[in-house]
Image: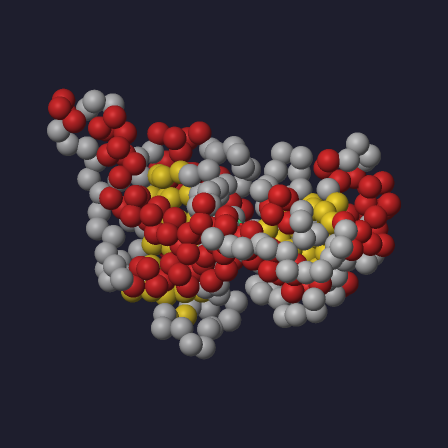
């Protein structure tokens, strides 16, 4: 259990470092209660003023901002905050933040993949096992009372010893690789650069990786370069028995193309936690037993949220005490 005891000698709310919360009104987070004793939190979502006048009014005093989950943070909003030096992203992915603007302004960013990596990796592996062994299908079969009547439900296939290709070998991808090695899978990966001290084999492009894999697991960030990185050619290369798992972002896959491949049986199955137009999920997928769906929750466990809160707190404390930050996200 994290301790947030206030060891500082701040005397009143006026002495506390000012931190701006950037959230949609619908995203409430217990973080607010945790941080309140230690920081002077400004929350435009709670103010009756329009956000832009609220931000203009506090513009000069805001050096740090917490971006809650995937609340979009545009260059326009950043321009209202000329003193901003630090963005603490309470998420692993940062595709909702204008990184180019942050890079130009030299704004430092931290993200939450250290807090989320293990749980996101567990979820990716769980989706793979479920697609291969049809666990959700079997669950539906039992609940529908079909066992005494039909006896058999659809046959799955073995997951152990398969060739798994990981797209994006950051913290989450690496945890996925470690777990699947224990199942006897052979692991290869694609990422921007070959990683020097990693025991998995490297493929410089996703097409080659797909050709050499029985399953692809997407763990990379969504950027201009990775948008629709999984397209018709990659799915063809993965082949009729191939399985695709996505715990990254929906738009890594050309979703319309994937749906066509699944409907025609041109790919073996899919385990999807993320979608192009969340919360809308293509309805055609609902009928398919070789598809397992979850509502963008790979990262969420009570432990990972606790780790996130601790990480956000530690980063803000470090920033205002001029100490090294944890989990700095390198903007390239
Ligand atoms: O998808 C969740 C995250 O990026 O934290």
In the image: residue 320, left or right of residue 192? right
Quarter of the image holding residue 108? bottom right
Compare residues 113 and 11 and report the one nearer the observer: 11
Q: How many dots with numbers?
A: 0
Residue 26 lies, in percent from the top left, at 63, 34
Q: Position of residue 201 (x, y in %)?
A: 37, 71
The answer to whether 129 appears left or right of 52 in the picture is left
What residue is drawn where x is 33% and y is 44%?
269
x 36%, y 62%: residue: 177
Q: Which of 297 and 163 lies nearest the eye of the viewer?
A: 297
Q: Is residue 223 left or right of residue 209?
A: right
| Relative depth, front residue between 81 and 287 | 81
Q: Quadrant of residue 209?
A: bottom left
Q: Is residue 304 above or below residue 143?
A: below
From what the image shows, is residue 10 above or below residue 56? Answer: below
Does the rendering let one see residue 316? yes
Scheme of image coloration: secondary structure
Please identify the quadrant where the C terminus is shown. bottom right
Relative to residue 230, is residue 188 depicted above or below?
Answer: below
Q: Nearer the viewer, residue 94 or 86?
A: 86
Left or right of 157, for residue 43: right
- Residue 118 appears at what percent x and percent y? 41, 56
Residue 137, above or below 90: above
Residue shown at 86%/45% (left/top)?
57
Answer with the quarter of the image where residue 17 lies: bottom right
**Residue 170: horizontal and vertical position, in percent?**
48, 63
Identify the residue at image location x=37%, y=44%. 270
Asked whether the viewer can see residue 255, the reply is: no
């Amino acid at each position: 259990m994290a301790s947030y005891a206030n060891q500082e000698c701040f005397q009143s709310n006026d002495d506390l470092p000012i931190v701006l919360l950037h959230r949609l009104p619908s995203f409430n987070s217990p973080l607010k209660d945790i941080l309140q004793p230690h920081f002077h939190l400004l929350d435009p979502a709670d103010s009756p003023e329009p956000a832009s006048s609220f931000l203009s009014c506090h513009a000069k005093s805001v050096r740090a901002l917490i971006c809650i989950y995937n609340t979009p943070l545009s260059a326009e909003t950043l321009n209202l905050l000329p003193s901003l030096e630090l963005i603490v992203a309470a998420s692993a992915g940062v595709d909702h933040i204008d990184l180019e603007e942050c890079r130009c302004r030299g704004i430092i960013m931290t993200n939450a993949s250290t807090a989320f990596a293990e749980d996101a990796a567990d979820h990716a592996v769980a989706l793979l096992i479920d697609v291969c062994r049809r666990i959700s299908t079997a669950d539906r079969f039992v609940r529908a009372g079909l066992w005494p009547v039909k006896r058999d439900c659809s046959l799955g296939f073995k997951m152990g010893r398969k060739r798994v290709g990981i797209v994006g070998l950051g913290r989450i991808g690496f945890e996925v690789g470690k777990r699947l090695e224990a199942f006897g899978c052979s692991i290869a990966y694609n990422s921007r650069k070959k990683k020097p001290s990693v025991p998995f084999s490297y493929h410089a492009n996703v097409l080659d990786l797909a050709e050499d894999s029985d399953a692809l697991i997407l763990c990379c960030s969504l950027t201009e370069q990775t948008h629709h990185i999984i397209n018709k050619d990659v799915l063809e290369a993965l082949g009729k028995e191939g399985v695709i798992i996505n715990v990254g972002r929906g738009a890594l896959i050309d979703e319309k193309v994937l749906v066509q491949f699944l409907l025609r049986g041109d790919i073996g199955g899919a385990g999807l936690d993320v979608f192009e137009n969340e919360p809308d999920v293509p309805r055609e997928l609902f009928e398919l037993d070789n598809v397992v769906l979850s509502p963008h929750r790979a990262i969420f466990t009570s432990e990972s949220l606790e780790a996130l809160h601790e990480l956000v707190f530690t980063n803000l404390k470090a920033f205002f005490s001029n100490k090294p930050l944890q989990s700095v996200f390198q903007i390239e």
